[in-house]
Amino acid sequence: MSQNRPLYLGPRLRRLRRELGLTQQAMATDLAISPSYVALIERNQRPVTAELLLRLARSYKLDVAELAGEDSEDYARRIGEVLRDPLLADIDLPALEVADLATSFPGVTEAILRLHGAYVREQQALADQRLGPGPDETGAIGAASDPVTETRRFLAEQRNHFPALETRAEALAAQLAEAGGAQQWLRKHKNVRVRFLPPDVLVESVRRYDRHNEQLLLDDTLGASDRQFQLALHVAWTALREDIAAIVRPARFADKSTTALVRRALAGYAAAALVMPYEAFARAAEARAYDIPALGGLFGASFEQVAHRLTTLARAGHEGVPFFFLRVDEAGNVSKRLDGAAFPFAAHGGGCPLWSVHAAFRTPGQIVTQWLELPDGQRFFSLARTVQAGGSHRNAPTVLRSVALVCAAEHAPRLAWAKGIDPAAATPIGVACRLCQRADCTARAAPPIGRELLADDQRRSPAPYMFAEG
C-alpha cells in the first residue's frame, strides 16, 4: 500500500461485517468508533487509517496484509483489459477515470466485469457451435476467461492429486484423531467453540465462522457426514491455508474468480483428505472393492464425498482405480466434473441420453450400473446414483442431482459393483449427438457433423434422421 494514497475498504469491510454477523453499531463498539463513521467507510466516503486497520486486525484476528490488499489496482487492470475489447474501442476513457471508477465504485466495477465476462462466454459458445471444437482439449475458444473451465483444467493437469497437501492432511488427521475429533481439536488448539444453530439463525449459511467470538456456527439440520465435512473444511482453512496458498500462488490465474474457485476446490480436497486419510482410505478402497456405500460407512462420509475422494488416489506406487466423475442435475447441467479414466466428455451441449447417469433420476437413491461402448469400440464401466442437496433453509428447494463414476474396462474387475455384469451387454453411447456417427440411434437429438441428411417422403425410419450413404 502506498504511503501517500488513502486506503478505501468499503465493500470489503461491509462483506467482513456481514460474515461476522455484526451490525454497524456492534462493529463500531468493537473498534471504538461511531456507527456513522462505519457507514461512511463502507460507502468509501472515508479512508481507513493505519491505526484503524490495526484495530480491525486485532479485533477480528485478521491478516493485515490480506485485509489491506489493493482491490482497486486489480479492478483497474481488469477494467482496462475490458476496454480493449473491439466492441468498446471507440470510447475514450482516460486512465484516471478508470482508476477513479475502480477505487470509488468497486461494486459498479464488479458488475461491469461480470457482464463483460458473460458476453465473452456467450460469444465463445456461439463460435463453438459454428466452428466446432477449437484447438484446446476442452473445445472452448479462449476458455481461460471462464473461471469454471480454467479451474477444471488446472485440476485435470494435476490429475486431481496434490501430494504435498495429502502429506500435511494425513499428519493433521492423526492429530484430529488423537484429540477425539475435529470439534475437540478446534477447541484445544484454536480455542474455537463449535455451536449448532437453526437455519433461520444462521441466515442463509450452513457454516459461518464468528471471528470476534471465536465460534464456528453450523446448521443444526446437517446430516452426520455433512457436519463432519464442514468441520473438516474449517480445519483445512485454519491449519492448511498456507499449504493451499503455496499451490495456488505459482499458477498465476488470469482473474480473482478463478483463484477463488481453485482455493475452494483445494480446501474441499483437504477436507476430504482429513476425513478420509490417503493410506487408510486407499487400503480400504482396495479391500472393499471400491464399494462406495461400504466406504461411506467406514469413514462416516456421504456417497458423493466418497465418490469424489476416489478420483484423487494417484499417489506414486499407491494408485487407485482412475475414475471420471460427473455430477448433473435433472436438466442435464453439469455442476461438477473431474476428468480421469480417459473418458471423453462433451465440453459443450448435452451428453448422451443413453448413459444411465440420466436414468438414475428414475430410481432415486439406488445405484445404477452400466457397461458403455463408444463408437470407436472403447468400453467403460459406469455406476451412478442420485444425491440430494438443499432444503434446510426456509423456502429453499431440495435439489436432486445424479453422480456418476466411470472407469476404463481393464479396471472394472477391481470393482464390486461390476461383478456378474456381462461387458458384452454394453450400451452403445456417443460423446454427444453432434459427434456421434451412429446413424440408427433412436435417441438422437441432432444430426452429426459432416453427414448429409436424406429427405425421403416415402419412408420413415425409427431414428429421427436419415442420412445419405457416404
Image: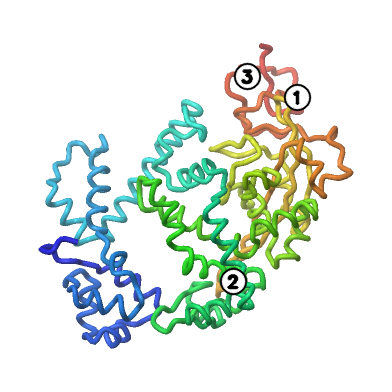
State yes or no: discs 3 and 2 in contact (Cβ < 8 Å).
no
In the rendering, which numbered label is found on residue 175? 2
Q: Describe the element under mark 2 as helix, strand or loop.
A: helix
Q: Earlier in the sequence, mark 3 or mark 2?
A: 2
Image depth: mark 3 or mark 2 in front:
2
Looking at the picture, how far across and down is residue 65, in whole percent?
A: 28, 65
Quickly name the residue at label 3.
453
290 with respect to 4 (left or right): right
Q: Residue at x 27, y 43 (%)?
A: 82
Looking at the picture, how far across and down is residue 249, in whole percent?
A: 38, 51
Q: Amino acid at mark 3?
A: Leu
Front residue of this view, candidates 49 and 171: 171
Q: Residue at x 54, y 60 (%)?
A: 168
Q: Describe the element under mark 3 as helix, strand or loop.
A: loop
Q: Residues within 10 Å of mark 1 (few under 14, many from 20)?
A: few
Could you give the CA–CA distance between mark 2 and mark 1, rounded to whole angstroms?
65 Å
Picture quarter containing residue 371?
Answer: top right
State yes or no: discs 2 and 1 in contact (Cβ < 8 Å).
no
Could you give the CA–CA distance between mark 3 and mark 2, rounded to whole angstroms?
65 Å
Q: Residue at x 73, y 51 (%)?
A: 360
114 with respect to 226 (left or right): left
Front residue of this view, candidates 185 and 85: 185
Q: Residue at x 71, y 33 (%)?
A: 429
Looking at the picture, how far across and down is residue 400, in whole percent?
A: 65, 59
Name above or below for residue 344 compared with residue 255. Answer: above
Picture quarter containing residue 143?
Answer: top left
Quickly name the residue at label 1.
461
